[in-house]
Amino acid sequence: MIVVVIVAGLLMGAGAIGALVRIIRGPSALDRIIASDVLVATAICAIGAEMAINRHTDTMPVLLGLALFGIVGSVSVARFLSARDDT
């Protein structure tokens, strides 16, 4: 069990670092936005894994808040980019 936890933590950490690099270096705003969505999704996965490992639901409101933030952020950016392309 501990090996699975370590491997999952390393993979989530690598995904988060890759997303942070893309946020910092990304050549366009769209790259940065997608990387921030990936970072939020990675945080959601990490919180969900922590909840499963420790067998509790104490951080469920944080998980739901991040999910709401990810959805609202993606939809608002898509609407903004769609409106910008129409002109």
Image (tube, rainbow, N blue to C red):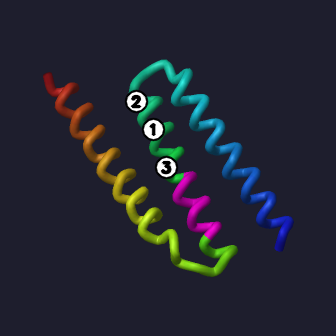
Of all residues, the one furthest to the left in this rendering is: 87
- Mark 3 / mark 1, whichever is N-terminal: 1
Task: Name the residue beneath numbered marker 3.
Answer: 40
Q: Residue at x 35, y 58 (%)?
A: 68
Give the crowd class for mark 3: few <14, some 14-19, many >=20 residues within 10 Å.
some
- Mark 2 / mark 3, whichever is N-terminal: 2
On residue 34, which mark appears? 1
Give the crowd class for mark 1: few <14, some 14-19, many >=20 residues within 10 Å.
some
Q: In screen coordinates, is 51 left or right of 80? A: right
Task: Name the residue beneath numbered marker 2.
Answer: 30
Q: Position of residue 83 (x, y in %)?
A: 17, 31
60 or 78: nearer the eye?
60
70 in the magenta segment: no
Compute the Cα span from label 1 to label 2.
6 Å
Label 2: which secondary element: helix
Give the crowd class for mark 2: few <14, some 14-19, many >=20 residues within 10 Å.
some
Of all residues, the one furthest to the front in this rendering is: 58
Evaluate if marks 3 and 1 touch, with contact meaning CB atoms under 8 Å apart.
no
Of all residues, the one furthest to the top in this rendering is: 27
Q: Main secondary structure of the magenta part?
A: helix
Label 3: which secondary element: helix
Compute the Cα span from label 2 to label 3.
15 Å
Q: In screen coordinates, is 67 left or right of 47? A: left
Magenta residues span 42-50
Amino acid type of the residue that numbered disc 1 sits on in the rendered structure: Ile
Label 1: which secondary element: helix
Q: Residue at x 52, y 59 (%)?
A: 44
48 in the magenta segment: yes
Q: Position of residue 64 (x, y in %)?
A: 40, 65
